[in-house]
Image: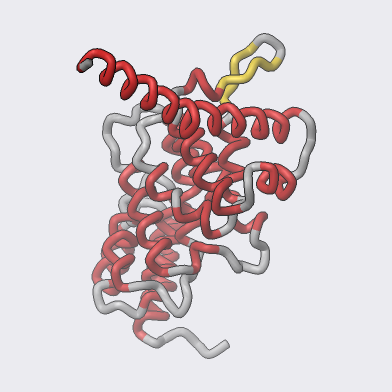
Amino acid sequence: MAAWTAAILLALSLAWFVGAVVVPVWQTKTIVTAYATQGIDESTAVERLGGQERAARRLALYLRMPKSWRHKPIICVPTDEADEAAFLLFACGRPGALVVPRLLESRDAEILRAVSCWGLGDLRTRHPDGQHPWLDPELYTRTLAGLLRVTSDQEIGDEVLRWDVGEGLVALLRVRPVPSIPRAAVPCLVRALEAESIAARCAAIEALADSGDPRARPAVEAMLMDEERAVSSAAAEALKKIRGEEPPK
């Protein structure tokens, strides 16, 4: 009887896994591949995935699967579909944005590259009017913290990956959440002053100047000594704004 019960439970568990994971991932892979190779547009792909909320969940699950599940052969060269999946995830609006901080916890270089460079790095192209989910202060802070966690990870030796993540960091640093830079984000902005990317350091300086937080001034003042002239110049301009010396526009 015990063995029979165990067998039934095992079968039920297997059936649940197939229905909850295998089938959705297979269906998602089919649609992502069609998006990548057959030219269907993003809105059609998201609709086929069940709408923005369901598509975001399915794409996040798909991205967390082993690399072998995401590979597609193009001219006999295995390539990763993470980039296409990230494009579709960012087409899901806020539901897609909400899963980004969790994806940034991944150790998979392709996921980090896709989410940072092809997702966040494309914010201005996708939202030229600036109306996107990262204007939300909490989501902005969580995503910024996730990017900084990746850029400061000493175990990541892939210079290309570090550059790609830096692209996402710069794009997000240029976002100005509503109604203003949240206080919780200021420590993250201060950490961003240590970024390898010159553009990231300049963008962090500008964001700190806009924050109105008293912690911004000493952090920006320290950047006057940065060896890169673009960064020290950005710090000098930011300090004028912080001190109220900037002429009216």
Residue 85's quadrant in the figure?
top right
The residue furthest top is 76
The residue furthest bottom is 248
Picture coordinates of residue 235 (x, y %)?
Answer: 38, 67
**In the rendered image, the vertical position of residue 197 relative to residue 215, given as above or below:** above
Residue displayed at 61% across by 31% down: 27
**In the rendered image, the vertical position of residue 84 relative to residue 197, given as above or below:** above
Residue 35 falls left or right of residue 163: right
Residue 181's quadrant in the figure?
bottom left
Residue displayed at 51% across by 33% down: 62
User: Dividing the image into 4 quarters, which one contains the N terminus?
Assistant: top left
Residue displayed at 58% across by 46% down: 55
Q: Is residue 171 visible?
A: no
Residue displayed at 69% across by 43% down: 48
Residue 44 falls left or right of residue 226: right
Residue 194 falls left or right of residue 34: left
